[in-house]
Amino acid sequence: MKTLRLLQTTLFRLSVANMAAFAASAGVLLLFIHNATVAFIDRETNATIEADYRGLAEQYARLGLSGLARVITERLNGDTQTGDLYLLIDLYHRPVAGNLALWPTVDSQADEWIQFGVEIPEASGPVMHAARAKIFDLADNHRLLVGRDIEDRVDFQGTLTVFLVASLAIFVVLSGIGGILTGRNILGRVDAIARTTHSIIRGDLSQRLPMQGIGDEFDRVAESVNQMLNQIEHLSKGMRTVIDSVAHDLRGPITRLRSHVELTFSNPPSIDSYRQALDTALTETERLHHTVNTLLHIAQAEAGTLAIEMERVDLSAVARDVADLYQPLAEERGLCLIMDATANIHILGHRELLSHAVANLIDNAIKYTPQGGAIGLTVSAVGPRATVTVADTGPGVSPEDRERVLQRFVRLEASRTTPGSGLGLSLVAAVAQLHEAELRLSDNTPGLRVEVIFRTAV
Amino acid sequence: MRILLIEDDRDTAAYLTKGLREGGYTIEHASEGRDGLFLATSEDFDLLIVDRMLPGLNGLAVIEALRAQGNKVPVLILSALAQIDDRVRGLRAGGDDYMTKPYAFSELLARVEALLRRGHSAAPTTKLGFADLEMDLLTRTVTRAGRRIDLQAREFRLLEYLLRHAGQVVTRTMLLDGVWDYHFDPQTNVIDVHISRLRQKIDKGFATPLLHTIRGAGYSLREDA
């Protein structure tokens, strides 16, 4: 099964094709080398034979037939291991001189190259060797054969052929093994990715694709997929929290609404009680409506959906507008809302969400600051940082609760009596996150100081 | 006044039709985008109420098709999508106002009235008035019964909005939208305080109060109580 899948991998098929192409071209090259070598050796042999003949022909011209026979015999007596072959015969094919016992049986014409077998006496007995020769017709009906024992050349050719075929075979085997190994490796990594993907499909979003840390193409793909998974996990977590929150915060009002209606039905019918019940129902639905909208706002801000269009926003203008909206309310509650904004501090953001966040901060400050207190709304910029600060003189938030109040629906015990959904600060946190801003809660001695630190836009 | 309602949810459609009929409007209903577009092009309407998500042809496509034909009928978009920038997309497609579900019927009625009114007074005005209250948009002065009333910039815009919708119910969200350009609901009802301040300035010392609070709905400039 594994082998079959290996054979199916693209890489394996690619390496097989590659191997075949390479083997073919290597084969052609080796064949060429083979033929060229053989031809070269043949040419050398022929040249030697012809030079040899020219020497003999000179002797023949100078000394005549008997002289030629003597020269041949002398040459052969000189040394026996050169592989030179000579045979001089007369009209009746009788050997006159030379080291061949018989004229070769192959059909032969003058000035032609012939190949034939020749018996060479060796220690172990006579051995057939391949020989190459040229026949020359002499003037007085004699014929001369000048040749060479080419057994060495034939041996060499055989060795060369074996060597070439063997190297081709080794090459094919080695590249096949290489293909299988790399195929296995790649297949292993693909399998790992597939396994992870399957567990993700089954719902385990915490899984991440394995990375080798060598920065190759697999790592690069794994890295982007992992980033995508992070975002998906983040979104789906956000989604789940929204659903939990919605269930949590809607159940209360719906239960109240329902019990109120049921109670009204169980009481004796009267226009007044019906009116009152409807009035309560309307108030409750309005609150439900408001909560749902706020939750959706938070969810979207948290998810940082692509649908949100960021633009250059004047943070000071945003703060000024919100201050303007809340000023009368603050005054009515006996609070002093002090606005201090440096002009023209721009960030890249979403005006509506930023306004909503600042409004929530001011809203909270107004809600929790006792009469006679002061609320400061400041926008300042230092270097690349733009900070919106809302500071109040209310009861503040204890250090251990600061992290908690940013979560949804968290309302500290002390504030149970004040109306509110407990969503205000979590929207601020979500908006801050969306703008990649830092949200800092600190002690205003006394009171709460909330700072949202943005990056300024160029 | 004829209104074409293009809405696929039968309950919502029935409820809106009933409510708007009681409000004195004539309602035609189409439950599909293509039918709606056909009705809107073949007959005359004073207003269209279009759901964004429709079978056949979606709401925005219907509006875009109408606008492409040069049809300028006011359109109110209803949407269950609460994407933050969705409203912008709706208005860009050629809608005149945008409401997200769930909405209060009083809110819808108020917006319908505002749209119908807007369709009739297209000419730019320099003076607004209601009863003995007068506003000059060029000199930015307000007088009531000839007596000058000093208003802050925001109060001026608030009164301007109310005057432009005199006699109609104006909801809090309409004011937040029209005067502050905010599309979220602040946790505390801040508008009430702005209204009571404005009321102090324009009604205090005069026999007939003009700025009324309509319980459960919003505010209205009216002469009768």
Image (cartoon, helix red, strand yellow):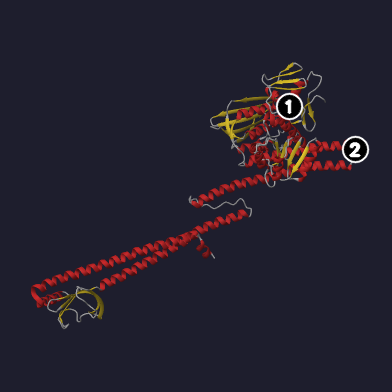
Q: Residue furthest left?
A: A63
The type of residue carrying mark 2 is Ser
Q: Secondary structure at mark 2?
A: loop
- Alpha carbons under labels 2 and 1: distance apart: 38 Å
Residue A283 point in image, percent of width and height: 79, 36
Q: In the orientation shown, which residue stands out farthest toward the right?
A: A268
The answer to whether residue B188 is visible is no
Q: Is residue B128 above or below residue B28?
A: above
Q: Which residue is mark 2?
A: A270
Q: Quadrant of the N terminus of chain B?
A: top right
Q: Nearer the viewer, residue A203 or B223?
A: B223
Q: Is residue A181 left or right of residue A274?
A: left
Which amino acid type is marked by label 1?
Leu
Chain label for disc 1 = B
Give percent across and percent down for residue B85. 64, 38
Q: Which residue is mark 1?
A: B162
C-beta proximity under 8 Å, tags 2 and 1: no
Q: Quadrant of residue A436?
A: top right
Q: Position of residue A39 (x, y in %)?
A: 27, 67
Where residue B176 appears, as percent x and y from the top left, is 70, 31
Q: Is residue A343 visible?
A: yes
Helix, strand or loop at label 1? It is helix
Q: Is residue B219 left or right of residue A140?
A: right
Which residue does the image show at 89% across and 41% down from the upper left?
A: A267
On the rendered image, what quadrant is the C terminus of chain B found in? top right
User: Could you say which quadrant of the image residue A366 lies in?
Assistant: top right
Q: Residue at x 54, y 65 (%)?
A: A1
